[in-house]
Amino acid sequence: MKDLKHLIFFENLLQEANNDLVKQAKAEGKRAIGYTCYFMPEVLLDLPGCFSVRLRAPRCTSPDIATYYLSGRVCHYARSLLERALEGGYNFLDAQMATETCTATCRFQEHLQQKRLDSVEDMRIIDNDDFFCEFTDIPFKNTENSYQHFETQLRAHVLEPLHEHFGIDISDEAILKTIEAHNEVCRLINEIGEYRKLDNPTITGYEFHVIQLVSLACPKHLILPYLQETAKEMKTRKPDRKKGFRCKVVLAGSENDDPDFTKLVESCGALVVCDRYCYGAAESRIPIVVEEGKSPLRAIAEHYLKTSNCPRFMPQDEMRARKQRLADLAKEYNADGIIIASNKFCEYWSYERVIDTFILSRDFGLPVCSIEKEYINAASGQLRTRFQAFVESIEIKHIQEGK
Amino acid sequence: MAKKSMKKALKDFWFGKPHSAEEGGRRLGELYEDKTGLYKHREWRGVKDTFYYMYMIWGYNYLHMVTDILKYSNNPLDFVKGTWRYRWMGQTYLPVIHWFDRGLQGMRGEALRASAWHYRAMVSASIQQICNFFNADTRLHKGKENEAFRHTILANETTCGTMFYPWMDAGYQYIPLEMIPYFVTCHVNSHTVLNYIDAVQSIGLPGDPCPMCQAESGLFVLDDVPDAAPFVITCNEACDASVATSTLQDWFINRPLFALPLPMQFDDPLVKKYCMNEIEECWKFIEEQTGEPFSWESMVKRLEKQNKLQRDEWEKWEVAGRTDYYPVNGVAQALFRIFSTQYGIQGDFWDEASEKVKKIMYKCVQKKINSFPQTRHRVIAWSCAPLYFSNWCTWAYNCWGLNVIINMDSLMFDMEVRTDTYEHMLEDVATYHMWAPMRRMAVGGMQHIFELWENMEKFNCDMVAMYDQLQCKGMQGVHGLFEDEFRKRNINAFWMPHALPDSRTVSRAEIRRQINDYMTTVMHEEPLDPSLLDFDDSMTW
Amino acid sequence: MKKIKCRIAKFFLKLLGIFVLANAAIFVVFFFDLDGKLMFNVVEPFLKKHYDNMERKDTLKTPYDMDKFPKYEYKN
C-alpha cells in the first residue's frame, strides 16, 4: 500500500509527550492538562483555553530513579511516566487530572501532587509554578448513583479547578461545543478505523494505532486537519493485491501506547483490526450523545461509565457482559482470533486475561493468545514466537474447517 | 560453687531462666527441632507460668476446641465431614495450639495471660465461623439447601461485618467468605495456602498480583469453598487485585453477586452520599434475596457492642502509648483487631476477651508491672504484615528486645458509629467501611500512609518495622518516599520483605536475617537470646 | 467405722493417684510437644495425602452465562 502522507509526521509526534503540536498549542497560550486513564473524560480537558494530553513515556526503557521511588515491582508504565516526569519531560503540563483507578498510576500521580503536608515532603517534580494535580473519585458501577456521583466529582474536581486556576469557561455551552469538536475527532477516527473491517483492509493496525495515539496525545484542534486529510486519503487508498497478513485479530488488554507492539504482532502475520485496550479506539472514540433534557456534564458522566469495558467495573452483569462485547467486536471486525495482552504487574488485567482466555475460547469458539508484556517491549523474541505459533494455530484451524 | 549452681537451678525451676544474653539466660532457639519448628520440649517458664500455660492455655483451648464445636455446630458430624472435605480445615484446625506456642513464646506473667485471651477469642470466633459454614454447606448435605443455608450471608472477607448486623436478630449469620479458608489458615498453618496459590497460577494467573488475592481465587479453582449461601456480596477492599478477584470468583460461585464498591478518595466530603447510597443498595439487595427486612434494633444492638469494643481498644491504646504496662504482645494486638473487625459482632467472645485483658492491664498499671521488661525499642509496625510470620513480633522481642506496641492494621478503624438516628448511623457506617478492615491507610491519597509519624509519637515509639509486601503495589509505590523521610527524620527503621501468605518467596529465616543485620550493623546491638538469631524452621507450620 | 474410713481414704488416695498420673501423662504430652509431633508427623501427612488424592470438580467447566444475572440496581 502507498504510505500515508502524514504517517511519518504522526510517528514523530509520538516520540515525545511535549511534541511540536503541544508546543504550538502552549505558544497559543493554551493550558496543557495531563491525564492517564480513560475514566478522566478527555473532552472536559479540551475545553476552550486548554487541551488534553494523555501521558505517555515513549522510549523509556530504564526507569532507574522511578524504580527507587516506586520499586521495581509496580508496572513499567507507571514507573516510566514517573521517570519521564523526573527527567523534566512533563514540565509543559499545567495540571494533571488524576484518578485513583489503578494503584500504580495513582501513586505516580500522587508523586506529582503538591500536598503541602508535614508528613511527607513534596518533590516538585513538575517544574511549573502553575501546575496542580487534582484527584477525581471514579465509581466502579454503571448505575444511577454512580452517574450522579461521577457528575458531582467531575464538576468539583475537573471543571471548577480548571475555572479557578486558569479561568476556563465551564458553561454548558462551552462543554457542548467541546463535545461537538470531540465527536468530530471520533467520527474521523471511526471513519479511518472502518477500513479495518474490509476483507483486505486498506489500513494496518500499526497505522491506525499511530493515528489513534496522536489524537490522544496532541491538541485536538491542531491534529484535526491532519486527521481530516488522512480520512480523505483513505477513501482512495488501494490495498496490496496480495494480502499482507495471514489472519486478523482483535488486540485487547491493558495499557498499550506502543505502536511498535502492534507492529510486532503484525510482523508475525496477524493484522490487528480492532483495538480494545486502554488508549485504544474501541471505546474512546464512541461519540458522546447529549440526550434532550440532560446536561452536557451529565451526558459525559454517563457516557464514560457506560462505554468503559475496564475490568475495574464490578457489577456481576458488567463483568460478564465484557466477554460478550469482546466476542461481538471480533465478529464485527471479522477477526479470526483475539490477543489478550496484560502489562506485567497490572492486577486488573492479569485476572481479566485469565478468564477471557477460557471463556472466549470455550463459550465463543474464538482462538485466544494470552500474553503478558512490558510497557516497552525491548525484548520481543519470546513474544514473536508466541504470536507466530498463534498465527499458525489459526491457519491450521482454518485448514481443518476447510476455509 | 555447687551451692550457687543449685540455687540458680532452683531459681530457674521456680521462675524460669532469665531473659538475658548472659550465660545462664534462656535459649529459646535450642528448644526447636531442626527444620520442623516443633519443640524438643516446650519452654519451661517457671512453675507458675508453665502450669498456667499447660492448664489455662494449652489444655483450656484444646478443651474448648471440642466444646465450641458442640456449641456452634448443628450436627457435630458435619464438622467431621467438613474436616475430611476441605484441606484448609483439616490441615489447619489441628495445629491451632502450635499457633499459640509461636505467638506466646517466651511470654511470662501478665503478658502471657492477656495475649492468650486475645488468641482465645480468635479461636472461638473461628470455630463459630467454621460451624456456620458447615451447618449451611450444601456439599455436606447431599446438595440440599437447608435452613442454615438460607440464613447465611456470604461476603468477601474484606467487607466489614458491620454491614450485616440488621439481619442477625432474624437468625442470619454472616460469614466472611475467605477469612477461615485463607486468612486464618495462613497464620495457623502456612502450608495450606500454597496449594491455592499454585492452583490459580496453574490456570494462567501470573505470579505478581497480590498473593492474598491469588489464594482467594485459588480456593475456588481447587473447588475448596463451601457452598453455604444463596447469594454473595463482594467489595473493592483493599486493592485492584481484590476487585479483579471478584471476576474470577463470580465465575466459580455462579450465584447472585452484589458488588459493594466504596469510594477511593474517602477524605472528599462529596463521596459520602454516594457511599451511603451504595450501602443502602446493598441492604436492599439483601432484603430482596432473603425476604427479610432491615432491622434497626438488630443493627443498633450490635453497633453498641462494637462501639464498646472500640472504646475498650482506646483505653488499651492509652495505656500502651503512655506507659510500659500494656500486657498484650504485638501479634495478639494486631490479630485481635483485624479478626474482630472483619468478622464483626456475632458472639460475646470479643467482649469477654477484651474485659479480661482490661482487667489484667489495670492490674499491671496499678502494680506497675512491666510485662515486657527487656524492651530496648518500642516499635511501630507499619503496612501489611506477613501472615505466615505474624509471630515475628514475639521472636523480635525475645531475640532483640524489640517490643511492637502497635501496628497499622489496628489503627485503621478507630471510630464509633453513632446510633442516635438512622442518618447518623448510615453516615458513620459509610466512613467505617471506607476505612476498614484493610483500607484506611492504603488508599485515598498517600497522606494516610504517612500518618506513621503521628502514630509513632502517640504510641511513644522509637523504631519502625516497615513491612515490605513485595506484591503490594500501593505500598511499593511509596517505597522511595519512605526511604527519603526516614533519612530526613533520622528514624530507625528496618524493612521486612515478605509475600503475605507465601513463605516460599521470602522465608521466615530471611526475614529474621534482615532484622538481625539491621540490629547488628546499624544499631550495633547484641541479641538478648543469641540462639534465636539463626535457626532452620523452613518446614514449620 | 475404722474400716470404712480406711476404704474412703484408699478411694481418695486412688483418686488422687489417678489424678496425679493423668496430670503427669498430660504434662508429658504437653511438655514434650507430643501433640505437635503427632499432628506434624502423622496426622497432617495422612490428611495431605487424602486431600491430594481427592477427586475434585473441574471448576473450569463452570458455566458462564451472560444473561443469568440481572443488573442489581435499587433506586434510593
Image (tube, coloured by chain):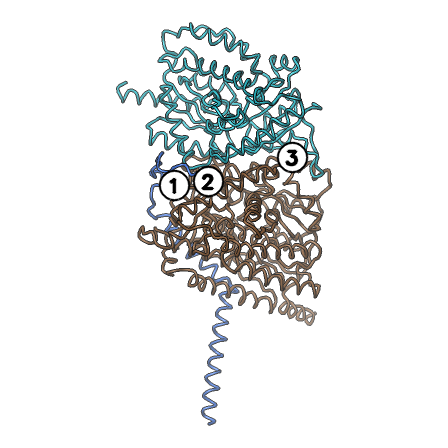
Type of amino acid under label 2: Ala
Q: Are marks 3 and 1 in contact (CB under 8 Å)?
A: no
**Residue B343 visible in the current orientation:** yes
* Chain displayed in cyan: A
Left/right of residue A268 with respect to residue B371 in the rendered view: left
B35 lies above or below A326: below
Q: Which residue is mark 1?
A: B252
Looking at the rendered structure, whether the residues under marks 1 and 2 are on a common chain is answered as yes
Left/right of residue A323 with respect to residue C36 in the rendered view: left
Q: Which mark is residue A175?
A: none
A176 lies above or below A145: above
The N terminus of chain B is located in which quarter?
Answer: bottom right
Q: Residues within 10 Å of mark 3 (few under 14, many from 20)?
A: some
Type of amino acid under label 1: Phe
Tell me the distance, in whole angstroms, between the alpha carbons under discs 3 and 1: 39 Å
Q: Residue B284: image x %, image y %?
A: 45, 44
Q: Which residue is mark 3?
A: B480
C70 lies above or below C36: above
Front-lying residue, B193 or B457: B457
Type of amino acid under label 3: Gly
Which circle's residue, 3 or 2, is located before the other in the chain? 2
Q: Colour of chain B?
A: brown
- Which mark lies nearer to you, 3 or 1? 1
Local secondary structure at mark 2: strand
Q: Which residue is mark 2?
A: B259
